[in-house]
Amino acid sequence: MEGIVQDPQGGHHIAAALSGASVTFGSFTALSDISLEIGAGEFWTILGPSGCGKSTMLRLVSDLVPPAAGTVEILGKSTEAARLAREFAFVFQDATLLPWRSALKNVELPLEMGRKRGIDIPRGERTPRELLELVGLKGREDALPHELSGGMRQRVAIARALVCQPRLLLMDEPFGALDEMTRDRLNMQLLEIWRETGVTCLFVTHSIPEAVLLGQKVLMLRAHPGRVKEVVEIDLPEPRHVELRETPEFNRYSSYLRKSLEDC
Ligand SMILES: Nc1ncnc2c1ncn2[C@@H]1O[C@H](COP(=O)(O)OP(=O)(O)OP(=O)(O)O)[C@@H](O)[C@H]1O
């Protein structure tokens, strides 16, 4: 395919490094003593009981909440410097598209906003049109969000997240609201995009099968306060495919994680 990023991580081996990081909201400790190294180009999924701090973890990495203690570095720089350099991008459960702009204009938005602020986006390897093609929406560039299905809107959101060529893609249950078949399709598409772009992925989910299917590593958080319970390496054949879910290895990982989740 065209436009393959030659060095998607800019020579870095570690995309995100957290050391003894904690997050507090007033007197409440949401995350406590998180130490992790997320390798450049890796795909991590995050599981844990409701309220354990999965979203807070993404917000910590993306400079939306500061650490109360410890440090967080993205590609060797502070989270603020990484944010200003557009090193990461977010995809939420709701696509959050502007309803009056076409799919293409939504994807172009971060570039426009960057230009308005005088920020030069240094890594424009793919045009917004090419990104829409990458997510399977060629021919729907002019469609308005309400003319697209939920899965299509989410694919526009992924294209928009990729437009500044981030090195780190942060996803908070991006497919949680979609039906199972659409979710399967988007999971496969996301893996293709991940392989092709080399972007590092941090993906929060409530679904154990989704965590196993996508993740090279599954980060299991425990609650009260949110802490790392364990990191489970998922050693399944690549490239992954939904049929893997029928295999005994897949089921072994799923059962292990289900039990781990129950013990949180
Ligand atoms: N801005 C905030 N102010 C106060 N408390 C907060 C704030 N944001 C999150 N919290 C609390 O921090 C804890 C972790 O929240 P978070 O949303 O990260 O959990 P989660 O694991 O993503 O939950 P879920 O799986 O239900 O989406 C929760 O107890 C939540 O109430």
Image (tube, rainbow, N blue to C red):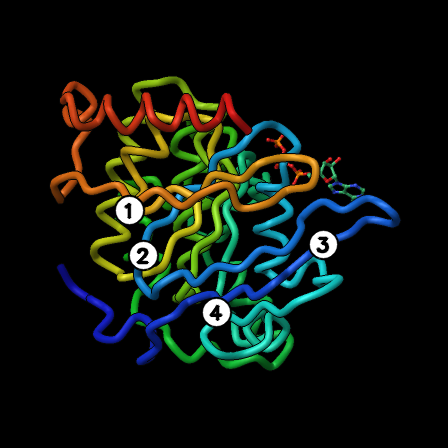
User: x, y percentage for residue 45?
Assistant: 40, 42
Residue drawn at (28%, 52%) of the image: 194
Which amino acid type corresponds to the residue marked 3 in the rendered image?
Answer: Val
Q: Position of residue 181 (x, y in %)?
A: 30, 19
The residue at the point 26 percent across, 60 percent down is 197
Instruction: From the image, tell me which residue sits under label 3.
Output: 23
Q: Mark 3 and ligand 1: say if the CB distance to the nearest ligand atom is below 8 Å.
A: yes
How far, Cα to Cα, is label 1 from label 2? 7 Å
Secondary structure beneath label 3: strand
Q: Specify few, some or many for label 3: CA neighbours under 10 Å numbering under 14, 14-19, or 20 or more.
A: many
Real-space Cα distance between discs 2 and 3?
24 Å
Query: Mark 1: which secondary structure?
Result: loop
Labels 2 & 4 near each other (Cβ < 8 A): no
Q: Amino acid at mark 2?
A: Glu
**Nearest to N terminus: mark 4 or mark 3:** 3
Q: Nearer the viewer, residue 27 or 158?
A: 27
